[in-house]
Amino acid sequence: MVESTPKTILRAENIHKSYTMGKSSELKVIKGLDLEIHQGEILAIIGPSGVGKSTLLHILGALDRPTKGKVIINSTDVFSMGDQEIANLRNRMVGFVFQFHHLLPEFTALENVAMPGLIARKNTEQVYKTAKGLLEDVGLQDRMEHRPRELSGGEQQRVAFARSLVNDPVMVLADEPSGNLDLDNSTSLHQLIWNLVQKKNKTFVVATHNKELASRTDKLIELYDGRIKT
């Protein structure tokens, strides 16, 4: 029996990213990078601080435009579109988890998880049903009505992870998701991520310094001098 080729979720081609420094100097962060990510794959991006991990993640997730090159998500050439079209695509197709949870302090855990679905103008009742299910998946069924200040750091990051999944994105991007947590909470969050990603067959890309997290991924790439180290 011939194994089927995994579906390509994202393809990055010849990605460059530079920043202008002062009047004449230019900082080249990404220098011609190619990458392909498949359905259900867990990919880690590692490398020293300042090497461009976050920059690459933001480009892959359509948060930032490359200076040159293209990103194709589910056959869509993302940066050929206008800013509003990119924002709509990003909200539908990409979930984000950052080192700091970025929860809205005035809203409950449930409202925070539901927010991307409400922004996408989905059916309110269905969005809240999905949000409740995700909070149950991350073990916070008894904390749905709590606001962020009433939750621990680990619980806040679980809420953020649930929020990243509420629109059923094709992939989730995480930038140092456990970087602000202690060892026990980090280990717990990593196990949760693995369980949910596999359960829901999600593509997951994580930029991390955490060697234990990186060692458990399907694919590992290391950035060095703006390129993938071979």
Image (cartoon, helix red, strand yellow):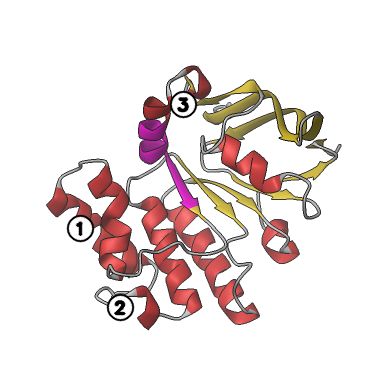
Q: Please tell me whether the stretch drawn in magenta is mainly helix, strand or loop.
A: helix
Query: For residue 143, which quarter of the picture?
Result: bottom left
Q: In this orientation, does residue 201 appear? A: yes
Q: Is residue 189 above or below residue 172?
A: below
Q: Nearer the viewer, residue 190 or 48?
A: 48
Question: Mark 2 or 1 closer to N-term?
Answer: 1
Image check: 92 left or right of 228? left
Which residue matches tag 2?
A: 143
Q: Which residues are magenta?
A: 87-96
Q: Give the residue type at disc 2.
A: Arg
Helix, strand or loop at mark 1? helix
Which residue matches tag 3?
A: 74
Q: Nearer the viewer, mark 3 or mark 2?
A: 2
Helix, strand or loop at mark 2? loop
User: Dot 3, how many residues are within 10 Å of its Cα: few (below 14), some (14-19), or many (20+)?
Assistant: some
89 magenta-colored: yes
Q: Nearer the viewer, residue 177 or 19?
A: 19
Question: Mark 3 or 2 closer to N-term?
Answer: 3
Residue 195 at x, y percent in the picture: 48, 61
Q: Give the residue type at disc 1.
A: Tyr
Q: Residue at x 37, y 74 (%)?
A: 148
107 magenta-colored: no
Image check: 115 left or right of 207? left
Q: Which mark is residue 56?
A: none
Q: Nearer the viewer, mark 1 or mark 3?
A: 1
Which residue matches tag 1?
A: 128
Residue 185 at x, y percent in the picture: 56, 77
The alpha-carbon separation of the residues under discs 1 and 3 comes to: 27 Å
Q: Residue at x 61, y 51 (%)?
A: 206
